[in-house]
Amino acid sequence: MINKEGEVIIEIKYNRINELQEGLACVERNGWGFVNKDGREVTKLEYDEAEDFSDGLALVKRMENGRLLMPPERLC
């Protein structure tokens, strides 16, 4: 992922990278998790499914049990 100046901010080491939402991007590489705008992983890549942050929350799913992840300001 690159910023507006063309600088690489998230290395291509993930299978999927969603757009930044509320300062975090949902990424996948053998599991879903989140990285911040600097590309630093702020959660483990341990979820079977994950959705982008919206209104301070993101829905993540692991082994058929959905749960809400804490707001991004607690992760960064």
Image (spheres, rainbow, N blue to C red):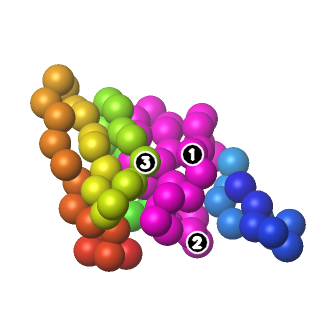
Could you tell me residue 41's position as x and y percent? Answer: 45, 61
Real-space CA distance between mark 1 and mark 3, rounded to the nearest whole angstrom: 8 Å
Q: Is residue 48 above or below residue 23?
A: above
Task: List the residue tagged with mark 3.
Answer: 52
Label 3 Cα crowd, 10 Å radius (few <14 / some 14-19 / many 20+): many
Label 3: state its secondary structure.
loop
Q: Is residue 50 on the magenta stretch?
A: no
Quadrant (top left/top right/bottom left/bottom right) for the N terminus? bottom right
Q: Is residue 39 above or below residue 67?
A: below
Q: Which is nearer the eye, 16 or 45?
A: 16
Label 1 Cα crowd, 10 Å radius (few <14 / some 14-19 / many 20+): some
Furthest-top residue in this view? 64
Label 1: state its secondary structure.
loop
Q: What's under tag 1, amino acid-wise? A: Asn
Range of magenta residues: 13-39
Question: Of the residues under marks 2 and 3, which one precedes in the sequence?
Answer: 2
Question: Of the residues under marks 2 and 1, which one precedes in the sequence?
Answer: 1
Task: List the residue tagged with mark 2.
Answer: 38
